[in-house]
């Protein structure tokens, strides 16, 4: 018996969402420290509409996961992102290299 290719993406997406919920419940979201951000030394850009969609690597405890997010602010070295898991909103700072811009 074969797999149902028609719904495979939807099933994969649901499984990923369930895994993210479990990971997020089990550990605290990591973010860059003030020393790493250097906000008093480098320019900060804030997007008032927060519409730049990205994929970003974040860590809950020691577990790295890739999430769909929105870039809300950035410096030359870091990006402040906003993302949702289940009904919970998360915000954190990640290094620029941890983010890939999505096509509009």
Image: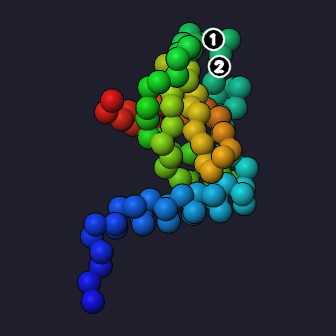
Query: Residue visible at 35% across and 61% down?
Result: 9
Q: Quadrant of the C terminus?
A: top left
Q: Quadrant of the N terminus?
A: bottom left
Give the x, y percent position of residue 37.
63, 24
Residue matched to label 2:
38
Look at the image and tell me whether residue 78 can be seen: no
Residue matched to label 1:
41
Badge 2: residue crowd in 10 Å (few <14, some 14–19, many ≥20): some
Q: Quadrant of residue 18 in the image?
A: bottom right
Q: Which mark is residue 56?
A: none
Q: Quadrant of residue 61 in the image?
A: bottom right
Q: Nearer the viewer, residue 53 or 35?
A: 53
Query: Residue visible at 40% across and 61% down?
Result: 10
**Of helix, strand and loop, which one carries label 1?**
loop
Give the x, y percent position of residue 21.
63, 58
Give the x, y percent position of residue 64.
55, 54
User: In the current view of this chain or complex, which residue is farthest to the bottom?
Assistant: 1
Query: Residue visible at 68% across and 11% down?
Result: 40
Vertical relation: 66 (above or below) 99 = below
Left or right: where 9 falls relative to 37: left
Real-space Cα separation, disc 1 to disc 2, in angstroms? 5 Å
Vertical relation: 40 (above or below) 68 = above
Vertical relation: 96 (above or below) 12 = above
Q: Nearer the viewer, residue 21 or 8?
A: 8
Left or right: where 62 falls relative to 7: right
Give the x, y percent position of residue 66.
49, 49
Colour mode of the rendering? rainbow
Badge 1: residue crowd in 10 Å (few <14, some 14–19, many ≥20): few
Look at the image and tell me whether residue 44 can be seen: yes
**Of helix, strand and loop, which one carries label 2?**
loop
Query: Residue visible at 57% across and 63% down?
Result: 19
Q: Tell whether label 2 touches label 1 (CB within 8 Å).
A: yes
């Amino acid at each position: 018996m074969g797999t149902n290719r028609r719904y495979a993406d939807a099933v994969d997406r649901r499984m990923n969402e369930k895994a993210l919920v479990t990971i997020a419940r089990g550990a605290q979201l990591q973010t860059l420290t003030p020393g790493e951000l250097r906000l008093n030394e480098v320019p900060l850009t804030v997007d008032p509409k927060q519409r730049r969609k990205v994929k970003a690597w974040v860590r809950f405890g020691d577990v790295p996961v890739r999430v769909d997010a929105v870039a809300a602010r950035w410096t030359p070295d870091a990006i402040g992102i906003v993302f949702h898991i289940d009904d919970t909103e998360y915000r954190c700072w990640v290094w620029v290299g941890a983010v890939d811009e999505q096509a509009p």
